[in-house]
Image (spheres, helix red, strand yellow):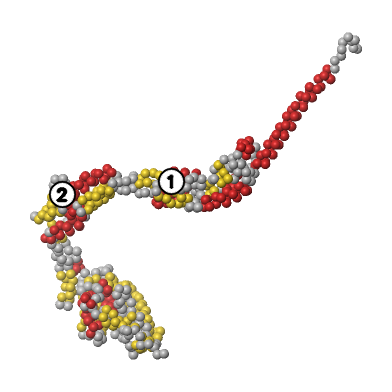
Amino acid sequence: MRSQGTPVVDVERHARPGRRRRRRAPLVLATVLVLLVAAYAAATWYVGDRVPRGTTVAGVAIGGLPAAEARERLESALGDAVSAPIPVVLGENETTIDPAEAAFTFDTAATVDELTGFSFDPRSLLRHLTGGREHVPVTTVDRDALTAALERVDGVVGVAPVEGAIALVDGAAEVTEPVPGTAVDVPAAVDLLAEDWLTGPHPVPLPSTEVPPVVGREAVEAARTELAAPLTGAPVSVLVDDRLVELTPADLTSAAAIVPDGPELVLELDGEALVALLTERDPELAAPGRDAAIVLQGGVPTVVPSTTGLGLDVEEVTAAVRAAALSPSDRTAEVSRIVVEPEFTTAEAEALGVTQVVSTFSTPLFHDPVRTQNLVTGTREISGTLVRPGETFSLIEALGPITAERGFAASGVVVDGLETTGMGGGLSQLSTTTFNAAYFAGMELVEFQPHSHHYARYPEGREATLFTPHVDLKWRNTTEYGALVEAWVADNQVHVRLWGTPYFDVESQTGERYNITQPTTVYNSGPNCVANSSPDPGFTVQVTRTVLREGTQVDQRTYTTTYRPWDRVVCGSAPG
């Protein structure tokens, strides 16, 4: 029961409004936060596909553009710059690097991706609100390929050092002072270009390094005082036994050179030149000997003995002159003459065994005094030629220049299948005769060319023409003995004989003619036309040579020769 004087308070009714307010506040805050997050998300979503305003890449403005448009603009604006040669400079020298050579690439997609995309990072939204800036492009480079490219560039723009040097000229010394060179600092240049090849200044100034000369200032000064000064300061007297010869500074410098040896300069003397100078000043210092010779005397080979001579030893002269030339006081070089052996001694000549006839061959002459004179001159020139084991005989070399001054004259030759005249006409007969002598001696037939037409005076398939300087006859002495050529004209024939020691046995077979071709009529209106009223068919023939040594076959070869027909030649124009 309630007391009449005590008021009853409804505690529950008075507490309910505050509790409701406390419960509503978190809800409001949550709602606001959700709205803010939604607004932030909407904002970041809105700007996520756009480049922050004011952004540039390699100087190209792409701010505010959607990602796809930004990529297109970069590719369009920088396409030429990415593929164009990169100019580089070192000092005053300039060249270029091909971007493909160093595998330079610009990744437009990766560059734009760094500037766009959905992100809750407030800094991303802040960039869009406040504006962007110059953005570093995403590039790649093959550092190994770039290193190789820069090493090539160094060979173009690098400056080699000037090496210290001393030249000796006319008794005086001319000094070249050393100067450092400049080279590309390749590792530093790789770092520079890898970072700034697209955005850096052009031409790109390459970092450099100094290249010191190998021969520096100290080496030059030492050579000047220790070598050049004494060498050019006074003459050198050379005492050879009891004979005295003076070499002037000009003589000395003509046979001397100061050359680099690593970082130093050293003196080199040409001993052969010094000996030549001494014997020029006093010819009696040298009494040359005589080589042995094998000559034909009384129709047989005879050894003319060699003799020794007197001369100077090159090494002794060099050492003595060096010591005197570099001495400040004793300027006399003392040397003695020595016995000089011949290059071809009597014993060596006798050992060649040139004592017997190995082979001989002859071909008949026909009446032509001028042609015969050419053969007389030609046989005289080649007769006495000694071909040592392993050496090759050349008919053109043995004949020497075929000129009127040496006794040759113009006579009949065949050019392009037609008869005409030429200097030394008829020497092909000497070539054919020599060919057969070598053929039957078993020599190696190195070079020969048959005539284009067959001549009845020559064995078919076994002959060789001659046309200087292009058509030669060459054979190699493949025996262990010397081969001495003897040639002469007598009894209306050309003869060639080889002397030596019999070594090979030779068998030869000539086959039947085949591929017979009939002659035609040719009209020749040239001024040197030679008419031919005796046509003759052409044909092909084979000759087989078998070479034996003590009964054992060592070589067998078949030679095939095709001859053109002798056409009937009429001098003048063809009838209409």
**Element under disc 2:** loop
Q: Tell me: residue 379, above or below residue 480.
A: below
Q: How many marks?
A: 2
Residue 459 in picture, x, y percent from top left: 31, 83
Neighbour tally class for label 1: few under 14, some 14-19, many 20 plus, Cα within 10 Å: many
The amino acid type, in three-letter code, at marker 1 is: Leu
For image coordinates 78% across by 22% down, the residue present is 18
The one nearer the camera, 34 or 519, is 34
Neighbour tally class for label 2: few under 14, some 14-19, many 20 plus, Cα within 10 Å: some
For image coordinates 19% across by 65% down, the residue present is 344
The amino acid type, in three-letter code, at marker 2 is: Ala
Residue 362 at least partly seen: no
Picture quadrant of residue 2: top right
Numbered circle sitting on residue 304:
none
The one nearer the camera, 400 or 90, is 90
Q: Of marks 2 and 1, which one's residue comes earlier in the chain?
A: 1
Q: Tell me: residue 150, above or below residue 41.
A: below
For image coordinates 62% across by 39% down, the residue present is 128
The one nearer the camera, 546 or 32, is 32
Residue 109 in picture, x, y percent from top left: 59, 47
What residue would you read off at disc 1? 206
Residue 394 at least partly seen: yes
- Hey, which residue is sitting farthest top in the picture? 5
Residue 259 in picture, x, y percent from top left: 26, 50
Picture quadrant of residue 255: bottom left
Q: Describe residue 287's horizontal placement relative to residue 183 as left or right.
A: left
**Element under disc 1:** loop
Q: CA distance from mark 2 to mark 1?
A: 52 Å
What residue would you read off at disc 2? 234
For image coordinates 29% across by 44% down, the residue present is 216
Q: Tell me: residue 477, above or below residue 24.
A: below
Residue 305 in picture, x, y percent from top left: 15, 68
